[in-house]
Every structure is written in structure tokens, then in C-alpha cells.
Image (cartoon, helix red, strand yellow):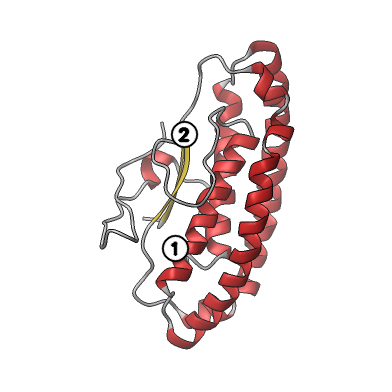
Amino acid sequence: MYPIAYSAAYEGEERNRLTVFFRALLVIPWMFVAALYGIAAYVAVIIAWFALVITGKYPQGLYDFNAGFVRMATRINGFYYLLTDAWPSFGGGEDPDYPVRTLIGPPKEEYSRAKVFFRILLLIPVFILLYVMGFILGVVSFIAWVVLLFTARLPAGLYKPMRIAAAYNAKALAYYFLLTEEFPPFWVEEEEEAPRFERSSPDHSLQTGPAGL
């Protein structure tokens, strides 16, 4: 069971043409906040890399901080790429009511120092596939943008490849930020991938059942 799960609820009802048309402008405030958060997260992941190589453990504070960035980036991408019309929240906290989510379990008790040390090399195939998925997401979301302007509805045939590409993006981001040491799967249906993360304390993990359609 993969420790990072992506959930996106299909919105087949009529969408708001106005917010769809101006989506690239409307998302700017969230992009600005995400850019600032991202800078801090990149610093945090460097510190986490050293901690993991030396101790084999991911400091809980750094883990929560980086997991928050992944969750926030997932929500913003879902909004920007038209998977949802719902306004995303600012910050990296869990938002169980938002239609697009990334579910992240607690950190492992022990991480492989070798997999952490060589993460830059291990990321090469992930980056290649991420580029392909990003291209698919960009092209299909543009087609969806045009279709939504004319029909105000997102066809399921466009939604599914967008969801698959966005899911890989979220899992690749989590892998980059060392939240998991398992390669992001290329294709896993949400009904099969949503794990039940047991809550070990009030502050850290989450508990959720299967998500998505």
C-alpha cells in the first residue's frame, strides 16, 4: 500500500464559466503564498536530508512542514488545472472537505540512509515521467478549459487523464521532499490506493478511509 494517496472528486455538475475563464489570474494569490512556502520547504528538505542520512529518522517538525507544502501544492494545482472550482485554503493544514487532497501518513520509524543519500540520482526517472505527466496535464487541462467555456461541464473523459497526471505530480513531489522512499507508482486507481493512516497522536497523522470516486 503506497503511503501517499491522491484524492480528487469528480465535479460533473455545471461549472462557473467566469472563474474558469479567469482561472490563471484568480490563482495568483495562492501561487504567491505557495512560492514563499516552497522556498522554506526547500530549505527544510535539505535539513531533513542531513538528518535522515545521519540518523535514519525524519524529524517530526520538518516532516509535518514539508507534508503541509505538498498538501497545499496539491490543492492549488487542482484548482489551477480545473479539477475543481472550489477555492483552496491557504496554508498546509489538512482540509478534508476540499475536493482535491493528498493524504499523507506519518513518517516511518526508520528510513534507508542509502535511498536518501542517492535521492538526487533516484529522482532522474521520476523527473522524466513527471515532465511527461506535466505535458499531459497542461494539454488536457487547456482542452478542458475550452470545453468548460462552451458547455460549463467537464467531461469524465477529460477529467480522468487530468486526475492521473495530477496524482503522479503529487506523489512525485512527496518523493522529492523525502516523505516516502518508495518510487511514485505510474498508475494506481484511487479506490485501490487510499490507505487508512492510523492516528498516533493528535498532532501528526491522519485517519481516513478510501477517497476519490
| Residue at 68%, 18% in the rendered image | 18
Quadrant of the image occupied by residue 44? bottom right
197 relative position to 188: left or right = left
Q: Is residue 186 visible?
A: no
37 relative position to 132: left or right = left
Q: Earlier in the sequence, mark 2 or mark 1?
A: 1
Residue furthest out toward the top: 151
- Residue 89 marker: none
Query: For the residues marked 2 and 1, what is the alpha-carbon distance in whole angstroms?
Result: 21 Å
- The crowd level at tag 1 (other Cα within 10 Å; few <14, some 14-19, many 20+) is many
Residue flagged by tag 2: what amino acid is it?
Answer: Pro
Instruction: Give x and y (percent) for residue 24.
Output: 73, 34
| Residue at 39%, 47% in the rendered image | 193
Q: Is residue 138 visible?
A: yes
- Say what secondary structure mark 1 lies in: helix
Quarter occupied by the C terminus:
top left
Q: Determine which residue is flagged by label 2.
A: 99
| Residue at 61%, 65% in the rendered image | 40
Instruction: Give x and y (percent) for residue 8.
Output: 48, 36
| Residue at 54%, 38% in the rendered image | 88
Residue flagged by tag 1: what amino acid is it?
Answer: Asp
Indicate whether 60 appears above or below 188: below
Residue furthest out toward the bottom: 54
Indicate whether 193 appears above or below 10: below
Q: Determine which residue is flagged by label 1.
A: 64
- Say what secondary structure mark 2 lies in: loop
Indicate whether 60 appears above or below 114: above
36 relative position to 112: left or right = right
- The crowd level at tag 2 (other Cα within 10 Å; few <14, some 14-19, many 20+) is many
